[in-house]
């Protein structure tokens, strides 16, 4: 079994097309077609269904992907024999939510580069559903996200930590020092919220709906930095992960509003695919996340 054919198979599965795989691998499309045909003949089964310009894995193709990943992982392990961490090269592909990238990961990366100076950390921000689809297709090595506690047969949770989601405002807001605020009275204030595809915005909407409350934000901004800047200028109230506003709270630029009937806890979680070999780069990244919390 030609190893290059296995790499081509995985690339076609990742790209969803022979053309995309050819472009990524630097082949002409006919080469990709020939290599996949050779692999299918050798295995005695069809690996892809051709649907127009797109291709999808067959049931046997999905089964073979498990073994293809194992073979690639073994090859990658062999390449590291005798190498020290500072000599390792390659990419570490992290799928991450925007707020975690800005407020958490950016603080940790300098320590990672002290160990793996030749490794390129490539980050991809997207909604969690898209990130996990990319992880499943081996387009990412790990996914670092915020959401409800998740259990999956396909992914391994390497680390998790609970996070409070809090209502925050400028210290001059009339609700800033008020105790026992209820959500119904708070929603009369101008809100600045993220897109409703985000986990904490969705969780807030669910609680509001249970109470028969409709939240109509003044601004919808899918960028936590921009929201925090507006809050510091005294504009409105927001609902954000505590880690994103921690520095502003310490500096007394923002305050947490005590809302007694709306308490939401989510989890920061770090996942990798169950078929993925846990490389030294990935192991070091996991330790970095754990040790700095």
Image (spheres, rainbow, N blue to C red):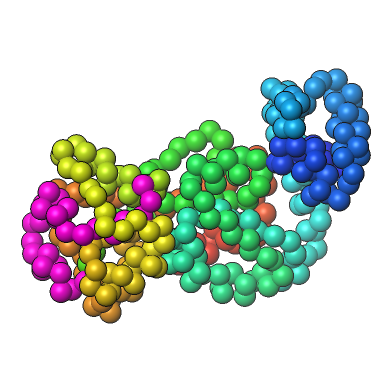
- Quarter residue 258 falls in: bottom left
Tell me: 275 left or right of 129.
right
Task: Give above or below for 56 relative to 134.
Answer: above
Q: Mainly helix, strand or loop, the magenta region?
A: loop
Q: In which quarter of the image is the N terminus?
A: top right
Which residue is painted at 86% across and 51% down in the image?
26
Range of magenta residues: 170-196
Q: Quadrant of the C terminus?
A: bottom left
Residue 184 lies in magenta, yes or no?
A: yes
Which residue is painted at 81% across and 48% down in the image?
23
Q: Could you say where residue 30 lies in the image, as x and y percent from the top left?
A: 91, 37
Q: Could you say where residue 220 lies in the image, as x and y percent from the top left?
A: 34, 56
Q: Could you say where residue 196 lies in the image, as x and y percent from the top left?
A: 36, 47
Residue 135 lies in magenta, yes or no?
A: no
Tell me: 217 left or right of 184.
right
Q: Could you say where residue 148 lies in the image, as x and y percent from the top left?
A: 37, 43
Tell me: 251 left or right of 98.
left
Q: Residue furthest bottom?
A: 251
Q: Which is more toward the observer, 211 or 189?
A: 189
Which residue is painted at 56% across and 73% down in the image?
111
- Quarter residue 149 falls in: top left
Which residue is painted at 75% across and 32% down in the image?
53
Q: Which is more toward the observer, 278 or 42?
A: 42
Q: Which is more toward the observer, 262 or 215?
A: 215
Q: Residue furthest left?
A: 179
**Is residue 194 something that shows in the picture?**
yes
């Amino acid at each position: 079994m030609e190893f290059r054919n296995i790499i081509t198979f995985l690339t076609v599965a990742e790209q969803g097309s022979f053309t995309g795989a050819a472009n990524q691998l630097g082949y002409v499309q006919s080469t990709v077609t020939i290599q996949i045909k050779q692999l299918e003949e050798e295995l005695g089964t069809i690996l892809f269904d051709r649907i127009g310009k797109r291709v999808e894995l067959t049931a046997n193709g999905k089964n073979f992907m498990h073994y293809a990943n194992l073979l690639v992982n073994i090859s990658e392990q062999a390449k590291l024999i005798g190498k020290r961490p500072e000599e390792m090269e390659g990419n570490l592909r992290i799928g991450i939510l925007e707020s975690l990238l800005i407020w958490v990961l950016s603080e940790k990366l300098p320590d990672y580069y002290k160990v793996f100076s030749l490794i390129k950390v490539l980050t991809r921000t997207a909604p969690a559903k898209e990130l996990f689809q990319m992880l499943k297709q081996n387009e990412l090595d790990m996914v670092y996200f915020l959401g409800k506690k998740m259990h999956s047969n396909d992914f391994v949770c390497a680390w998790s930590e609970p996070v409070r989601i809090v209502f925050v405002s400028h210290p001059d807001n009339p609700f800033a020092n008020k105790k026992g605020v209820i959500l119904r009275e708070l929603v009369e204030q101008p809100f600045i919220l993220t897109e409703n595809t985000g986990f904490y915005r969705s969780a807030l909407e669910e609680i509001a709906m249970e109470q028969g409350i409709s939240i109509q934000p003044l601004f919808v901004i899918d960028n936590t930095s921009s929201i925090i800047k507006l809050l510091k200028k005294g504009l409105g109230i927001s609902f954000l992960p505590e880690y994103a506003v921690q520095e502003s709270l310490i500096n007394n630029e923002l305050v947490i509003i005590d809302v007694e009937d709306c308490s939401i806890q989510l989890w920061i979680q770090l996942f990798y695919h169950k078929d993925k070999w846990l490389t030294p780069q990935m192991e070091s990244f996991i330790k970095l996340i754990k040790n700095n919390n």
